[in-house]
Image (cartoon, rainbow, N blue to C red):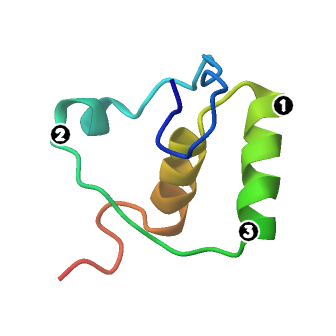
Amino acid sequence: MANRNGSDAAPAEATAPAPVADAAAEAMKRFTIDVPETLHRRVKAQCAGRGVKMADVIRDLLEREFPDGVGAR
């Protein structure tokens, strides 16, 4: 059966870094962003090579770029 990307390949299970404690208990919201195909391929390949999920890496990048309490109004 094809996955939502149209591929028959099964998604690879990966060991992800431990989520931030506060984020684990908090309700999640979804971002939908458009990125160039080449960037998507690079991120996907490097995450696969590291054995981590893309969502976990991007979540970590967002946490580092936008730390809690900095610039909040």
Q: Which quarter of the figure has residue 70?
A: bottom left
The location of residue 23, given as percent across then percent down, is 29, 39
Q: Is residue 1 above or below residue 64?
A: above
The location of residue 3, given as percent across then percent down, is 50, 34
Q: Residues within 10 Å of mark 3 (few under 14, many from 20)?
A: few
Between discs 1 and 3, the one toward the N terminus: 3
The location of residue 2, given as percent across then percent down, is 53, 32
For the residues labelled 3 and 2, the Cα–Cα distance comes to 31 Å
For the residues labelled 1 and 3, the Cα–Cα distance comes to 18 Å
Q: Which mark is residue 9?
A: none
Q: Is residue 57 above or below residue 71?
A: above
Evaluate if marks 3 and 2 touch, with contact meaning CB atoms under 8 Å apart.
no
Q: Which residue is mark 2?
A: 26
Between discs 2 and 1, the one toward the N terminus: 2
Residue shown at the point (53%, 48%) measured from the top left: 60
Q: Residues within 10 Å of mark 2 (few under 14, many from 20)?
A: few
Residue type, label 1: Gly
Evaluate if marks 1 and 3 touch, with contact meaning CB atoms under 8 Å apart.
no
The secondary structure type at the circle numbered 3 is: helix
Q: Which residue is mark 1?
A: 49
Q: Nearer the viewer, residue 34 or 55?
A: 34
Residue shown at the point (49%, 61%) measured from the top left: 62
The secondary structure type at the circle numbered 2 is: loop
Residue type, label 2: Glu
Q: Which residue is mark 3?
A: 37
